[in-house]
């Protein structure tokens, strides 16, 4: 059988089973299922395994400021009236513009005006008011009643709105707006009939521990970008306090899309979160789009993951899970390749030593017979897959290291281990099978 004659089907099948990368082939599905399971444990539904894998390759992370980096419930704390405008007049207009605003900011404006200026909410039904809702395009909201147009909104939006009638924001008010922004607050301007009456100061607080989490992301090689509708001064102050790598201020839906496309054009993988219909195009464009469960149906259909807890900061955990999945796959692939190479020293000499005696020098394990060598290799090949399944399911422990450090660690632990394990395992099986007289 081993004298140079054509090899039997048994030997050829044994060669195929032992020398193809069966180890990693048998574990790939287990690694993927484990990654999906870790997502479910964190109340995240991934639409596909590809989305989980992509999250591990993310280079750029886009995060909304409000509710993600900051606590989100911005509160109105002060009013700044324009020169010649009584504060009570500004307060009245601010209240009217906020009566139909159910956001935390809108409600806080009504509370501030009530507590500081004694102005209570009023019944407007008889005046046939037309409430103007906030949109990402106009970045303003307000009310039309009794021939009055009252608006509150972002500085640039109100300034443009007033300029259409030839009105400008007073320089003194611009100084107040700059002071609010420089301190990390958010200024809103109030206008009546396109005349700017003053500004409202909103204050927000950066969540605890965000700077440390962004440091971890930097250690992974991921760049973080904060997206906000605030003006550049406010955005810069919050970005510095939070520790993000960059920011996009006064962002509209088309600006988010343009930023994502720009990063992807550089070969980067982009992840972002969103919950509104206006976020849907950007979620669909991003490589990893995480929609909030409390968001609109359009957002959930556009993203490739849904966070059931609606916690935007969970995107950081999703990236970590994806990284762990890829590291586990890389580690076990390294082990598999090294494992298969080591098995050559058992199979090749056993099969061809009779025809080519010079190959006997490769029998470094000194296996007893060709039969015991092949049978030991086949049995070891089956046992090693079973032994590695728990590691594939649990995952290799993730540590935020650079690519070079991870490569060295994998080669040392799994590369060297993949070479040593077959030598020891096949030799032990050869001794056992020979002792039992099975080969």
Image: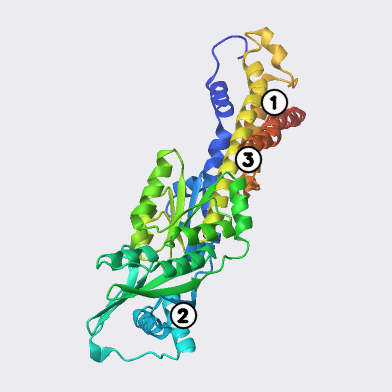
Q: Does residue 283 appear left or right of residue 345 in this picture?
A: left
Mark 3: give few (<14), some (14-19) or many (20+) Cα within 10 Å.
Answer: few
User: Which quadrant would the N terminus be assigned to in this image?
Assistant: top right
Identify the residue under disc 1: 439
Pointer 2 with pointer 3, Cβ within 8 A: no
Q: Label 3, secondary structure: give it.
A: loop
Q: Which mark is residue 402?
A: 3
Q: Does residue 82 appear left or right of residue 371 in this picture?
A: left
Q: Is residue 34 visible?
A: no
Give the residue at x 45% y 69%.
Answer: 187
Mark 2 or mark 3, whichever is nearer to me: 2
Q: Position of residue 261 (x, y in %)?
A: 38, 45
Q: Nearer the viewer, residue 215 or 410?
A: 215
Q: Which mark is residue 37?
A: none
Give the residue at x 57% y 65%.
Answer: 206
Mark 1 or mark 3, whichever is nearer to me: 3
């Amino acid at each position: 059988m081993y004298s140079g004659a054509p090899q039997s089907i048994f030997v050829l099948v044994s060669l195929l089973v032992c020398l193809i990368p069966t180890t990693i082939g048998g574990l790939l599905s287990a690694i993927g299922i484990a990654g999906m399971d870790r997502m479910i444990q964190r109340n995240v539904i991934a639409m596909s395994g590809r989305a989980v894998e992509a999250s591990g390759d993310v280079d750029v992370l886009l995060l909304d400021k409000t509710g993600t980096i900051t606590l989100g419930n911005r509160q109105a704390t002060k009013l700044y009236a324009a020169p010649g405008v009584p504060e009570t007049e500004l307060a009245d207009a601010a209240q009217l513009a906020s009566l139909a605003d159910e956001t935390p900011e809108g409600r806080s404006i009504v509370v501030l005006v009530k507590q500081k200026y004694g102005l209570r909410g009023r019944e407007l039904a008889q005046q046939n008011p037309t409430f103007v809702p906030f949109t990402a395009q106009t970045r303003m909201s307000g009310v039309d009643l009794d021939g009055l147009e009252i608006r509150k909104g972002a500085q640039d939006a109100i300034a443009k709105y007033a300029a259409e009638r030839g009105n400008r924001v007073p320089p003194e008010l611009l100084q107040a707006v700059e002071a609010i922004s420089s301190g990390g607050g958010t200024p809103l301007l109030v206008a009546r009939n396109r005349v700017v009456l003053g500004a409202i100061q909103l204050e927000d607080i950066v969540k605890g521990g965000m700077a440390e989490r962004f440091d971890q992301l930097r250690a992974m090689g991921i760049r973080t970008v904060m997206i906000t509708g605030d003006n550049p001064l406010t955005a810069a102050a919050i970005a510095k306090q939070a520790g993000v790598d960059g920011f996009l201020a006064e962002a509209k839906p088309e600006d988010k899309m343009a930023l994502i496309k720009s990063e992807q054009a550089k070969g980067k993988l982009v992840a972002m979160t969103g919950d509104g219909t206006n976020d849907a195009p950007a979620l669909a464009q991003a490589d990893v789009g995480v929609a909030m469960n409390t968001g609109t149906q359009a957002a959930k259909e556009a993203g490739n993951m849904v966070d059931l807890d609606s916690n935007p900061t969970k995107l950081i955990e999703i990236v970590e899970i994806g990284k762990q999945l890829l590291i586990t796959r890389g580690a076990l692939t390294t082990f598999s390749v090294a494992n298969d190479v080591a098995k050559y020293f058992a199979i090749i000499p056993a099969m061809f030593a009779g025809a080519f005696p010079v190959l006997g020098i490769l029998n470094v394990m000194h296996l007893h017979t060709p039969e015991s060598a092949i049978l030991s290799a086949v049995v070891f090949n089956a046992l090693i897959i079973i032994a590695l399944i728990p590691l594939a399911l649990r995952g290799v422990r993730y540590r935020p290291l650079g690519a070079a450090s991870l490569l060295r660690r994998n080669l040392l632990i799994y590369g060297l281990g993949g070479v040593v394990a077959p030598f020891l395992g096949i030799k032990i099986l050869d001794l056992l099978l020979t002792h039992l007289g099975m080969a």
